[in-house]
Amino acid sequence: MFQSITDFFSKKPPQKGGPLVPEPPFNASPLKRDTQRQQTFSKVFRWRLPAGQMKAPHSVEVIGSFTHWQPVPLLRDSVLDAWHATLHHLAGNRTHHYMILVDGKPWMDPTCDGMAVPRGPEEEQYQVATDKGPRVMMLFAQTK
């Protein structure tokens, strides 16, 4: 008898409605939850002196939508006689615009994924002239 009275008072009243956002089950793997985060990737940018040019520039930088148009210096590798920088955590599954700057002037990157019409004052500041008009470089950031 006392057990049935205890059971009666320990019951919770029925809930009206439910949560607006379904919560993941408690047994969900943390790895499955991480797949909802934005995918990122790393990219190596390289620049070499053009054939026949002997004088090394004072600075080589990469600038783009992934750096919020703030220059990132490329470091000189004396063994390869080239400049390089590896940028990490670039947003994946989108197209980025960028330019290589040699002594502050835009330089064509022969390894770019394509050319794009500049959008906005940041991109227009770093555009290069082409046969089809001013352009900036494109980087297709695809992740698997």
Image (cartoon, rainbow, N blue to C red):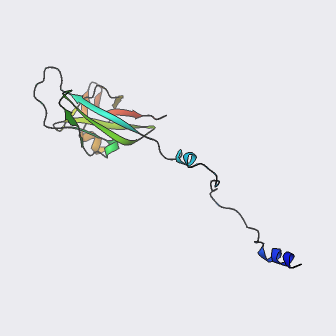
Residue that extends furthest to the right in the rendered view of this protein: 1
Say which residue appears at 34% left-offset and 37% top-offset: 97
Q: Name the quarter where the N terminus is drawn.
A: bottom right
Q: Which residue lies furthest to the front in this view?
A: 2
* Position above or below: 29 against 79: below
Along the viewing direction, whichever of 85 and 90 lies nearer the viewer: 85
Question: In the rendering, at what x and y percent does residue 141 appear?
Answer: 41, 35
Residue 135 visible to an observer of this rendering: no
Instruction: Residue at 38%, 41% (x, y): give it.
Output: 90
User: In the rendering, at what x and y percent does residue 37 appear?
Assistant: 50, 47
Q: Position of residue 100 (x, y in %)?
A: 25, 35
In the orientation shown, which residue stands out farthest toward the top? 52
- State which quadrant residue 117 falls in: top left
Q: Can see residue 55?
A: yes
Image side of residue 141 versus residue 6, left or right? left
Q: In this view, does 56 lie above or below 3?
A: above
User: Residue 135 appears in which quarter of the rendering?
Assistant: top left
> Would you say 38 lies left or right of 71 here?
right
Q: Which residue is drawn at 17% across and 39% down?
A: 104
Residue situated in front as seen by the camera: 103 or 40: 40
Residue at image coords 31%, 45%: 67
